[in-house]
Image (cartoon, grey):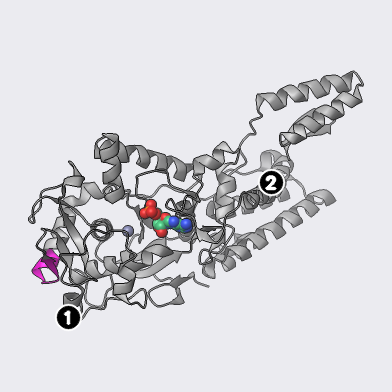
Amino acid sequence: MALRLFNTLHRQVEEFCPLFPEAESVGFYCCGPTVYDFGHIGNFRTFVFADLLRRYLEFRGFRVNHVMNITDVEDKIIRQVAATGLTLAEFTGRYTDAFLADLGTLSCRRPHHLPRATDYIPQIIELIRRLEARGIAYRAGDGSVYFSINKYRACGCRYGQLVTLDPDAQRRTERVSGDSYEKDDLADFALWKARVPGDGEVFWESPWGEGRPGWHIECSAMSMAILGSSFDLHLGGEDLAFPHHEDEIAQSEGTGLQQPGRPFVKHWVHAAHLLVDGKKMSKSLGNFFTVRDLLNRGFQGREIRFLLLSAHYRETFNFTLEGLDAARTALSRLDAAVAQLTEKAGSAAASDVPTSGPAAPASRSSLETALTEALDDDLNVSKAWAAIFDWVRETNAGLASGAWDAAAAADRLRAWRRVDEVMGLGARPAEEFPAVALALLDKRNAAKAARDFATADAVRGELKALGWTVEDSKTGSRLKRL
Ligand code: AMP
Ligand code: ZN
């Protein structure tokens, strides 16, 4: 079977075939963050999904050239730069670093390219010049340059490829605003925004005077500069399909840089939103958690990742802290099975697991086969997790029966490690016990040794209230998270 993915361009699930089968790598672009604050886990649902798709392509033997832009010039950023007195680079540098750290916390593979919009001003200007030369871009009275949808259509191009729309109605929801008066048509959008006093020192020289790029053109310029004028995969959250991605198509195809018959992007893949109480998690609604908020509550990055990957990417998914607790419990079952297998495998546990490329069918484990069948089916993670938790049950039963020797346990472990190259959960980190819990454990051990069981039980209760339980064994007692 081949990998099949929903393509927003054709509103159907389609086989993924690279645009240039002879090319070394698959061109993969995911719209990145706007770095004016810490990202929330809604944003990271989209980035973790992009990471899953990248990892799965790599697992299936594709080489992926992964680009994620950093939007480092935009209205909100400019307002904050003015308010903080920092330079644009200082301000956005902080949040870019924080974003990359959070991406690492969630075990996302680092994109191969992380272009910043402000490093691509010449390429942006060049694209706008091309559009102007073709009569599709025009300069308005305020010095800004707009994209003319009517002129674009007159060239035989289609505006409205990703969504069926009433552009005028939709445009009102666009986040790049403040550009409506000088336009020929309400649906037109800004490619270059003339400098206004509120921009402070954030501006660049251009053939149209001082100003800054519109948001949409940044992604056209960066993606085509790095991946070429036609490439395989473009991802983002579903809110970006219109107008951002529709405008990217219009700008990019409007330049006429593609070979005849080649689209700007072959597969458009959009991830549904993370919700809170039925509403999109967003900064403006104030209903958000950052990765840092959740770490401060004692959760681990891999638990957040596991939760974000528990629903299919095209389904909206409601976030709750209880859901995250449940994710922790489920993950600890998986961790326990892996820990027992590791113990059983002893020195037979292999560490030379290939990181990419499909295993030869003969050596493919049934777990790997089940994962491949599930993820080939438009990344059906529910099926994948069902197969993984069946494997956990079989593992527990097999270990309990005592039927497996070290080599058999090592084989199973190897199968899990290959599958985890895709799921990206990694090994459970060594537990860090808070000092207060360790002190209580000592107190309980002392009480037990003194046969003061009333105190020992009371201390156990205190530990429970802190989220810890005590496991007693022949070798002593140890703390375990509840
Ligand atoms: P931004 O930093 O606002 O440009 O958004 C970065 C990415 O996060 C985009 O792909 C958005 O579509 C995505 N995104 C924003 N909010 C959510 C959400 N609640 N759930 C999933 N993805 C989101
Ligand atoms: Zn973009």
- Disc 2 marks a residue whose amino acid type is Ser
Look at mark 2 in the image and give the residue it sits on.
332
Count the numbered circles shown.
2
- Disc 1 marks a residue whose amino acid type is Ala
Look at mark 1 in the image and give the residue it sits on.
154
In the rendered image, residue 264, in percent from the top left (x then y), is placed at 28, 69
In the displayed structure image, the side of residue 441 where residue 11 appears, left or right? left
Q: Dot 1: what SS?
A: helix
Q: Nearer the viewer, residue 20 or 266?
A: 266
The image quadrant that residue 192 belongs to is: bottom left
Q: Could you give the CA–CA distance between mark 2 and mark 1, rounded to whole angstroms?
A: 59 Å
Q: Nearer the viewer, residue 228 or 281?
A: 281
Tag shown at residue 136: none
Q: Which span of residues is magenta-colored?
A: 130-138
Can the viewer see residue 398 in this picture? yes
In the displayed structure image, the side of residue 185 where residue 276 appears, left or right? right
Q: Nearer the viewer, residue 23 or 371?
A: 371
In the displayed structure image, the side of residue 184 where residue 219 appears, left or right? right
10 Å crowding of disc 1: few (<14), some (14-19), many (20+): few
In the rendered image, residue 317, in percent from the top left (x then y), is placed at 56, 61
- Asked whether residue 202 is drawn in magenta, I would say no
The image quadrant that residue 461 belongs to is: top right
Q: Nearer the viewer, residue 378 or 287?
A: 287
